[in-house]
Image (cartoon, helix red, strand yellow):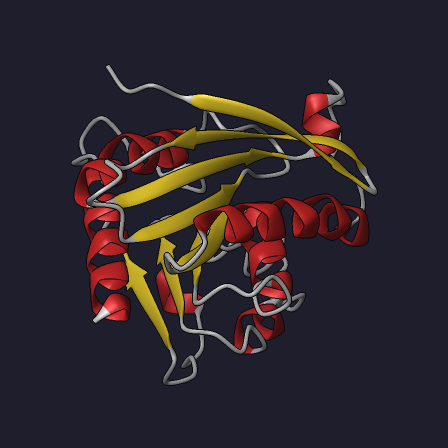
Amino acid sequence: MQQLITTAITTPAGEARITRYPAPARKRRAVLALGHGAGGGIQAPDLRALAEALPGDGIEVVLVEQPWRVAGKKLAPAPKTLDSGWVPVAETVRKAARRTPFLVGGRSAGARVACRTGAQTGAAGVVALAFPLHPPGKPEKSRVGELFDTGLPTLVVQGGTDPFGTPAEFPELPPTHRLVGLPAGDHGFIVKKSEQPVLDALVAAVAQWIDALLR
């Protein structure tokens, strides 16, 4: 059974919490910090799937709980507060990684945070899961600028029926970016009973992209 390590970290937005899913010491070749969305925590299926699968491939996963979740609040704060609750945590994880390549990411609102702050935290790349390209039913309110402006290699993994933006809705991304559109899956990568699960494909896409980035 995997031994998890949970640590509290003080930030300007309050106390955050990290849970490490360590890779075997001699096999560790990357560290990936992942944040949760505005409507849930680190128990999200996509985050758990990555945390359980990647360490065996030498990629340590660190799941980050924002201060508002640690404090038991139900509503996420404004983007600036989310960023201030994330940056010190990401920097702490990067320093602990030492010379091991460090990456950031997250799902939904957590993906936006990682995109906005990735370069600032010294990350080598960004993993954006279920990026909320726009509010449901409001494609005119696009957030694609946050993806364009990461300044880092960026992977986007999007469910085929995500109401916050299907793969087909994304414009052409910069050469440094890659979009993986899954055949099914809503904003939480949940599929209908008639559809095949997509979490294995999500994990494979992230693992393969990180492999290529490390070469």
Q: Is residue 203 above or below residue 75?
A: below
Location of residue 202 with respect to 125 vertically, above or below: above
Look at the image and tell me whether residue 141 can be seen: yes
Work out which residue is located at the far top of the displayed protein and give it: 1
Which is nearer the eye, 144 or 34? Answer: 34
Q: In this image, 54 relative to 83: left or right?
A: left
Which residue is farthest right?
12
Q: Say if 161 sits above or below 178 in the image.
A: above
Quadrant placement of the N terminus: top left
Q: Residue furthest bottom?
A: 175
Please say whether residue 182 is visible from this viewpoint. Answer: no
Q: Is residue 19 above or below residue 140?
A: above
Residue 27 as seen in the image, left or right of residue 115:
left
Percent of width and height locating residue 162: 43, 48
Q: Which of the pair 103/173 is nearer the observer?
A: 103
Q: Position of residue 22 (x, y in %)?
A: 34, 33
What quarter of the picture does the C terminus occupy? bottom left
Q: In this view, does 212 lie to the left or right of 46?
A: left
In which quadrant of the rendered view does residue 64 lie?
A: top right
Residue 123: x and y in percent read: 50, 63
